Structures are given as structure tokens and as C-alpha cells.
């Protein structure tokens, strides 16, 4: 197995699939929310800090980007990511073959191969995380107080801080760096100001988020993101045992079963060698500390998702690359002679010497990735796997349907808005943020979009309910995921008209949008 050839081949195939998808797919619902962030620049929102909004606004030339533009950019960035892993692995001292093997393991992981295509904070955090690991590895291996060490420490802290403005979990990387710099392996560097200066700069980069959260006006009041993430969205959380299966099962799917086993083997090997040198200490600490925080959080939170654990696992790819060509473990002797004792092959090396295992691991991961792409991109693929009439044709169950059909719905919505706005004010309202975000990202700042999500969301700041509930007219937009009558949400409005937009996939109804024009009874 030639990891270099496989990485090149897989990158080309995956880039081709991604570029094809960029011309075909609309935004996922979460992507649409992040695109909406571009219309309301702020250091933080209820779900995440504001970096993804800055990113969306940048590629959208000051507005929300189109799905095609966003996905073209993310396709390039996602394809580049495994090559950044290669560069980081080389920085840690891995051989060329080892670096290619580590990068290949990352590239074929379904969580990376499929998930990084989307315009999300996770893509930005992944890039910041791997850059930080590479920079910190370079710093701790350079001569203390050298110009390269100083620049690398400062850059590592800055990039880690910027990463935290994509997702708050990036702060765990800053803490792991501090733990590394305070360890015996980096004692010489800790006596210089540069590691600490880098961490201070990283904290300064994150400071606008803290200040914005602390000064948030009421409602919602101070620390709205923390309250939203840890209180408002956590109904039903706390059942630790009930979430174990979801956490473990999620990793088996997102990593693929065999790669998940390999990850455990590499983690055990990293634990065993955590004190070998400064880089091993760095990789161990940037894996262990985040996992110690994130695993209990995932077990507690009903709203947790498997990809929360992904960033700390990137260090495992670098450790795997470093250990790829080692013939056997070398354990320093306790004897005064300082000789090295040959301990024999570890689990990791046994895996390395089992080509069938390697082929099967990569093959299964690629197969899962291919199936995910086929499910979304090939008409009728899901119906090959499921009997006719199964509910997977319902968008409540087949979430890939959210990527199709919004173009036609937006055309219909825009037509009604243009016609009715000539006669007075009109607000577009949806029953949940997943509908509202798609509408807001596509319609832009010229159309008011309100939202009736059962709990408070960002739309309550952008278009407060007290405003759209007193509008002259409301265009209520929903689809067949939400069985919510418009008059339940707007009892003071009368229905003036209905229209439907039906979306077909493989000649089957995938989605039905219902557009209800409502008029205020008080003003009729």
C-alpha cells in the first residue's frame, strides 16, 4: 500500500465529487444559519462565536454567500486539510511515508471526507487546530529564545485563540498548550517569555467574544450563548448512561468502525509514549485535556453531537505518522549505562505489519464516505436500500432532503413578498429556525424574517417577535417537517391565501412547502 499515491488519488476523487456537489446542493439548515450570521456581524451568536459569520461575509462580498460560492470555497479548503496534516506531521519529525499515512487516515475518515464540505465552525476550528499543533511542535523543538521558537510560540497562541472564535471548544486547545509549556518537556522554553506571550495573544483574540457576551443587553441579558448552550437547549440532559450508546455509536459511524479501533490503539500508544520527548508531550496533552472535558459533556448533554470529539483526535494522526515506520518500541533503560531496551512490537506496530488490516480499514472508511455521497447526490439511491413507502422519503427522516428544493420555494416567497410589499409592510415568518435561516440567507437584508422557534433564537434579536406579531401582513412559510398551523402561532391574523411548492427527487415527493398569506385582523 502506497499512502502517497492513495492520498493523491483520494484527494482528486473527493475534490471532483465536492465540486459537483457545490453546483447541485443548497445549504444545509445549519449552514443557512451561519450564512445568516453574515447579515448581522457580531462577535458571538447564541450557538457559536462569530468567526463563521466573518468567513461567510467575506466569501459573500459583504452579504450572505450563495450555496454554490460557499461550497466551492469549502470544497477547496476541505481537500487541502489532509495535506495540512501531512505538513504538520513532517513538522513533528514524521518520515515522508509516515506523514502521508497519517494524512491518508484523516482524509478517508467519513467525518472529515463528508463533514468538512459544509460551511461550518467545525471546518474553521479544524484548520486552526492543525495549524496550532504544527506551530507548537516547531516551537518546542527549536532552541529556546531563538527567533523561530519565539515566532512559532506567538503564532501558535494566536491561531489557537482565533480557532476559539469559531467554536468555544477551541479554548481547550489554549489550555492544553499552557499545560504543555508548564511540563518538564518544555521547561527550557517556559523560562522564556514567548510561550506565555503567545497564549496571552490568543486570549486577546478571544476577548471580543467575552466582552460581547458579558455586555449583552436584556433580553436576553449577559452571557446569552452560555445560557443558550447549557440551559435553554438542554431539556432532557443528565442521563449519562442513556447517552453512552449515542456517543460510542456516533464515533463508530463518524470515524468508521475499524478506524475507531485504530484510534483507540494509537491513543493507548500515545499514552505509553507521552513522556518520550517534547512533541509526544504536546500531542498527549492536546488530546487528553480536551477529551477529559468533552467526553463527560457529550455524555451529559442531550444536544451533543459526535463531531464534538473530533478536534482532539487530530493529534492521534500526527502520533500515528511519527510512529509509522518504527520497528519496535524503545524504552529507555533505568540502568546507569543509559542503554535502550528493545521491548518488542506494540499493538500499533502489529497493525502496521498487517496489510490486510490496513486495506480493510481504509476500504471500509472509503465505502462509508462513498455511500454518504451517493445518498445525497445520486437520485433514488436511498430507495435502493429501503422498501417503497418507507418514511425515509419524508424530510423528517431523510435529512438530505433539506439540501434540495429551496430555490423554487424562495422564488415563490420572493414573488409574494414583492407583490404584497407594494401594498404595505410584510414580514416572512417560519415555525422554526431551520426554516427561518434558509429564508433569511436567501432573501437577504431587504426582507424582514421573523421566527417562532419554541425557545429563544438569534432571530429574536434580529427581528423580535413583538415586532412581527404586530405587522400588517405575514407570509408564514413551513414545510412538511412541521405540523404547526399558522393560526396557532399568529391567532390575531386571518388567512388571506395559500400556495404550495412541491419538490420532487427521483420522481417522488420529497418536500412540500406551504406558504400562507396572513392579514392582521386589527388592521383589516
Image: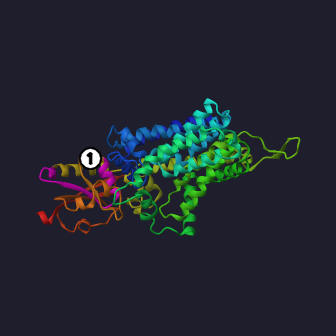
> Residue tagged by mark 1?
445
Label 1 sits on a secondary structure element that is: loop
**Colour approach in the figure:** rainbow
Residue in the picture at 56% in, 37% down: 154
Please report the bounds of the magenta region as a residue range.
419-441
Question: Residue 40's spot in the image, x, y percent?
Answer: 33, 47
Residue 243 appears anywhere in the view: yes
Seen from the viewer's position, the closer of residues 223 and 280 is 223
Screen quadrant of the N terminus: top right
Residue 242 falls in image quadrant? bottom right
Residue at horizontal 63%, vertical 35%?
Answer: 138
Quarter of the C terminus within the rendering: bottom left
Q: Is residue 433 shown in magenta?
A: yes
Is 480 colored magenta in this rendering? no
Q: In the drawing, does residue 458 fall left or right of residue 277?
A: left
Residue 399 in percent (x, y) is at 41, 56
Q: Is residue 98 above or below residue 377?
A: above
Instruction: Tell me, yes or no, if residue 128 can be seen here.
Output: no
Percent of width and height locating residue 2: 65, 36
Relative vertical location of residue 156 with respect to residue 481 in this rendering, above or below = above
* Left or right of residue 63, residue 283 in this image: right
Amino acid at each position: 500500500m502506497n499512502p502517497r499515491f492513495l492520498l493523491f488519488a483520494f484527494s482528486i476523487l473527493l475534490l471532483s465529487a465536492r465540486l459537483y456537489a457545490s453546483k447541485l446542493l443548497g445549504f444545509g439548515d445549519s449552514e443557512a444559519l451561519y450564512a445568516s450570521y453574515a447579515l448581522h456581524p457580531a462577535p458571538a451568536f447564541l450557538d457559536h462565536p462569530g468567526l463563521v459569520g466573518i468567513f461567510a461575509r467575506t466569501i459573500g462580498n459583504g452579504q450572505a454567500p450563495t450555496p454554490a460560492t460557499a461550497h466551492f470555497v469549502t470544497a477547496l479548503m476541505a481537500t487541502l486539510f489532509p495535506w495540512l496534516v501531512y505538513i504538520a506531521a513532517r513538522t513533528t519529525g514524521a518520515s515522508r511515508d509516515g506523514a502521508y499515512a497519517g494524512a491518508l487516515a484523516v482524509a478517508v475518515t467519513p467525518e472529515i471526507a463528508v463533514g468538512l464540505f459544509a460551511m461550518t465552525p467545525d471546518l474553521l476550528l479544524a484548520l486552526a487546530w492543525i495549524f496550532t499543533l504544527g506551530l507548537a511542535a516547531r516551537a518546542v523543538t527549536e532552541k529556546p529564545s531563538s527567533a523561530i521558537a519565539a515566532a512559532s510560540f506567538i503564532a501558535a497562541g494566536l491561531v489557537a485563540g482565533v480557532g476559539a472564535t469559531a467554536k468555544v471548544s477551541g479554548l481547550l486547545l489554549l489550555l492544553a498548550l499552557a499545560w504543555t509549556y508548564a511540563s518538564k518537556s518544555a521547561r527550557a522554553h517556559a523560562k522564556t517569555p514567548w510561550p506565555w506571550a503567545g497564549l496571552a495573544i490568543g486570549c486577546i483574540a478571544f476577548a471580543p467574544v467575552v466582552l460581547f457576551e458579558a455586555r449583552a443587553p436584556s433580553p436576553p441579558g449577559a452571557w446569552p450563548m452560555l445560557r443558550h448552550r447549557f440551559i435553554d437547549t438542554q431539556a432532557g440532559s443528565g442521563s449519562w448512561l442513556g447517552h453512552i450508546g449515542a456517543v460510542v455509536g456516533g464515533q463508530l459511524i463518524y470515524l468508521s468502525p475499524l478506524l475507531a479501533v485504530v484510534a483507540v490503539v494509537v491513543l493507548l500508544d500515545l499514552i505509553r509514549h507521552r513522556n518520550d520527548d517534547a512533541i509526544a508531550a504536546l500531542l498527549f496533552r492536546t488530546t487528553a485535556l480536551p477529551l477529559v472535558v468533552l467526553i463527560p459533556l457529550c455524555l451529559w448533554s442531550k444536544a451533543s453531537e459526535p463531531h464534538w470529539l473530533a478536534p482532539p483526535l487530530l493529534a492521534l494522526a500526527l502520533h500515528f505518522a511519527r510512529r509509522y515506520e518504527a520497528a519496535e518500541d524503545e524504552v529507555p533503560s533505568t540502568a546507569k549505562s543509559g542503554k535502550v531496551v528493545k521491548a518488542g512490537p506494540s499493538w500499533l506496530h502489529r497493525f502496521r505489519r498487517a496489510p490486510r488490516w490496513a486495506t480493510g480499514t481504509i476500504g471500509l472508511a472509503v465505502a462509508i464516505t462513498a455511500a454518504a455521497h451517493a445518498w445525497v447526490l445520486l437520485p433514488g439511491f436511498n430507495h435502493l436500500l429501503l422498501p417503497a413507502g418507507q418514511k425515509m422519503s419524508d424530510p423528517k427522516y431523510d435529512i438530505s432532503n433539506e439540501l434540495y428544493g429551496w430555490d423554487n420555494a424562495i422564488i415563490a416567497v420572493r414573488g409574494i413578498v414583492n407583490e404584497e410589499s407594494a401594498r404595505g409592510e410584510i414580514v416572512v415568518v417560519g415555525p422554526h429556525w431551520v426554516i427561518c435561516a434558509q429564508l433569511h440567507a436567501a432573501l437577504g437584508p431587504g426582507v424582514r424574517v421573523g421566527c417562532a422557534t419554541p425557545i429563544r433564537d438569534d432571530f429574536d434579536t434580529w427581528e423580535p417577535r413583538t415586532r412581527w406579531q404586530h405587522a400588517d401582513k405575514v407570509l408564514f412559510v413551513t414545510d412538511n417537517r412541521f405540523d404547526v398551523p399558522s393560526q396557532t402561532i399568529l391567532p390575531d391574523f386571518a388567512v388571506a391565501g395559500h400556495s404550495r411548492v412541491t419538490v420532487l427527487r427521483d420522481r417522488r415527493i420529497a418536500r412540500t412547502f406551504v406558504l400562507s398569506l396572513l392579514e392582521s385582523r386589527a388592521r383589516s
